[in-house]
Image: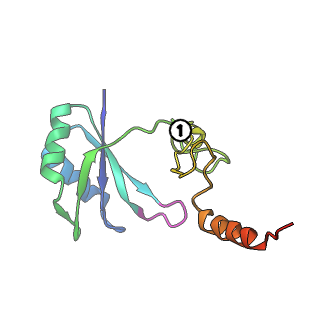
Amino acid sequence: MSIRLYIGNLPQTFDEQELVALLKNVGEGIRFKSVQDRETGNCRGFGFANVDDPKLADAVIEQLNGKDFGGSSLRVERSERRESGGNNRRSPGASNGGGNQAARKANNKVVHSDAPGEAAPDPRWAGELSKLKDLLANQKTAV
C-alpha cells in the first residue's frame, strides 16, 4: 500500500524538478505532485508525495522536514486521508466530515442555570433577556 506524504510550505514559484531531485536523493520510487491554483496555475504552497515503502517514507520525513527549500522551511508529514472520499466543498449542504456536522448540532449543550429544571436561555442572549425581565418586573402595577 502506498503511503501519502504531505509536503507543505513550498514557495509559490519553484522548480518541481528540483524538489523531485531532492526526493530522489533520499530514495527511489517517490512520486510528487504539487497542488496548483485553478485560476492562476501557481503552486498553492503544498503537494503530495507517494511512497511505496514505509521505511522510505520515514526517511523522507526525517531528512526533509524543516529543510530549507527556496527560502522556505519544508513541512513534511504523513497525509491524513479524507473521510468524505472526494472534494465536496463546493456542493451545497456538504460538510468536510460527512455527517459529523449534523451529529454535532444534535448534541444538547449543557448551559448552567440557577433554576433547576428550567430551560436555560441561549447564552448569546442571556444578558438581553435579563434586561427585558427587569424591565417587565418594573412595569408591573399592583391591582
Asked if one can make out residue 54 in the rendered structure from this viewpoint, the answer is: yes
As rendered, which of 139 and 32 lies closer to the eye?
139
Q: Position of residue 26 (x, y in %)?
A: 14, 45
As rendered, which of 95 and 35 lies closer to the eye?
95
* 13 lies above or below 49: below
Asked if one can make out residue 27 in the rendered structure from this viewpoint, the answer is: no
Query: Is disc 1 surrounded by few (<14), some (14 to 19) or many (20+) residues within 10 Å?
Result: few
Segment colored magenta: 37-43
Q: Position of residue 57 (x, y in %)?
A: 20, 39
* 13 lies above or below 84: below
Q: Position of residue 143 (x, y in %)?
A: 87, 66
Question: Which residue is pictured at 51% across the width and 41% down the height?
Answer: 97
Question: Which residue is pictured at 20% across the width and 52% down the height?
Answer: 21
- Does 40 lie within the magenta span? yes
- Which quarter of the figure has residue 82? top left
- Does 51 lie within the magenta span? no
Q: Mainly helix, strand or loop, the magenta region?
A: loop
As rendered, which of 62 and 38 lies closer to the eye?
62
Which residue extends farthest right? 143
| Amino acid tagged 1 | Asn
- How many numbered marks does the figure carry? 1
- Which quarter of the figure has residue 28? top left
Q: Position of residue 105 (x, y in %)?
A: 59, 43
Question: Which residue is pictured at 21% across the width and 31% down the height?
Answer: 53
Which residue extends farthest front? 143
Of the 4 image quadrants, the one containing the N terminus is: top left
- Which quarter of the figure has residue 55? top left
As rendered, which of 42 and 84 lies closer to the eye?
84
Residue assigned mark 1: 100
* 135 lies above or below 37: below
Q: Is residue 101 left or right of residue 64?
A: right
